[in-house]
Image (cartoon, rainbow, N blue to C red):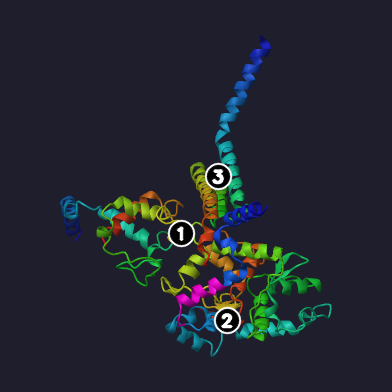
Amino acid sequence: MRKKMTVIKRLGKLLAVPLLMGTMIAAPSYADNAMVEKGKKVAFDRKKGNCLACHMIADGTLPGNQGPALIAMKARFPDPAVLKAQISNPLEKNPNSIMPPFGLHNILSEEEIDAIVEYLLTL
Amino acid sequence: MNLSLIKVCATAIVLSFASFNAAAGDFSAAWDAADAKRKEAGKMGAEWRDTGKMLKQAKKAAEEGDEAKAMKLVAKALEQSEDAIAQYQREGNLWAARVPQ
Amino acid sequence: MKKLLLTVTAVAIGMTGVGLYASPETDQAAFVNYFTKKFPDTPKEDFVNGVYSIDAASREQWIEIEEFPPYELAIDAGEEEWNTAFANGKGYVDCFGEPGVRGNYPYWDESRKEVITLELAINECREANGEKPLKYKRGKIADISAYMAYASRGEPINVEIPNDEALAAYERGKEFYYRKRGQLNFSCFDCHGGGAGNLVRADKLSPAYGHTSHFPVYRSKWGGMGTLHRRFGGCNGQVRAKSFKAQGPEYRELEYFLTYMSNGLDYNGPGARK
């Protein structure tokens, strides 16, 4: 019994590296998957981005509608820097904007905003 | 000659004590400055919700010996008050135009 | 001389911001117009029912809830408080005359030079008779206020601004309402003016017109009764602004401005809300 377990363990160790490399190769080279996942997490976190409060987002339930739906984002924001700026400080374009200035007021860190941008560009 | 030597030694001793306590002194001064800024924002009615809590947490971290965490929280709190004051000043020119005519 | 007068007047008008030049009456007319235009299907007098005046679905649920109103217990408790004498033998009736006087508040006290609200008056009645003041956000104060509100149902909202000092207080309340505040950078009007009728997740934002008429309120979220200033504090906290003291000058002047905006509507407290 013990011998079988050891064999399986050894097999696992043998296959681990090529398996891992396989998943890495399969990941898209354009967008960083880890960033996209992090961005989605921060976006949906009620204490952080809380984007669903005002925006409809695919995968999200009970979305608010104070802001525009977040769809066709790559087409609407061909330059990711513009999207980042809008999230970071929407007051630049509109000083009366009801969107919180996530960067200006340090609601989110720059890394978190970068991650959200990565996620939004997949929508 | 003897007197100036004593003076030099005394200064060296005082300075070494100062640098020994510099870390603790830095935190205290920084905390006081951040709290003063918080009160300044408060006088305008502009204080944010979490600033006071951050300063409390900073004191606690300092008491527990976590200097780095304490200073980080103090810096965060100071930034909150500065942003709140900037918000108050910015809004001074903006709020009236929102009133329905 | 005439030229000088004209120049001075022109400069004075130019110096005041657009929102400051209008009088409270024109402010209110524009406010009412803004909301009746935004919600043309809502009869004016119905705005006192908040979100239920602009959302048919939740209105159905609310009508059902009102059959066994969750604030009834508070009214009963408030009535008992009202009828219980203070240690010195006097009672609330000696301060107020009768419970149905909600319509007298808030008002500008010309000698004290401040806004007097119903809850403030309740505590001042207590203290004048040797009783300890109550906490301002929930509990007994909300019960007494609920009883008095219920006895005053149907009374018109008619806040007056008797002099320049009262006007200054009104203007301070008005500025509070339209100023963005908090880390999240919202003004009251952002949500209850421009955002009225919009959804925040699954909650519909109620319009500001008619806003203070139904307080104190049984709020399902609280699982109990609360006063207007409790709600003010909660709202400020929600936008990550440090809330002000209940019955402090800021919230009393905010109440003064906000209630004035609903002049002409009727008091309909206590209310039930989500």
Q: Where is residue B54 in the image (x, y as percent from the top left)?
A: 54, 51
Q: Which residue is drawn at 59% across and 25% down?
A: B15
**Residue A96: mark:** 1
Q: Position of residue C171 (x, y in %)?
A: 62, 63
Q: Which quadrant holds residue C268?
A: bottom right
- Please tell me which residue lies in front, A21 or C231: C231
Magenta portion: prevailing SS class: helix
Q: Give the range drawn in magenta.
A: C29-41
| Label 1 Cα crowd, 10 Å radius (few <14 / some 14-19 / many 20+) | some
**Visible residue check, residue C206:** no
Q: Chain ID for label 3?
A: B
Q: Is C242 colored magenta in this rendering?
A: no
Q: Name the residue under label 2.
A: C271
Q: Do labels 1 and 2 share a chain?
A: no
Q: Name the residue under label 3.
A: B62
Q: Which residue is drawn at 63% across and 86% down?
A: C154
Q: Position of residue C64 (x, y in %)?
A: 49, 89
- Answer left or right for A34 relative to C162: left
| Label 3 Cα crowd, 10 Å radius (few <14 / some 14-19 / many 20+) | some
Q: Residue at x 54, y 71 (%)?
A: C30
Q: How far apart are marks 1 and 2 (CA)?
A: 32 Å
- Please tell me which residue lies in front, C236 or B65: C236
- Answer left or right for A46 relative to C244: left
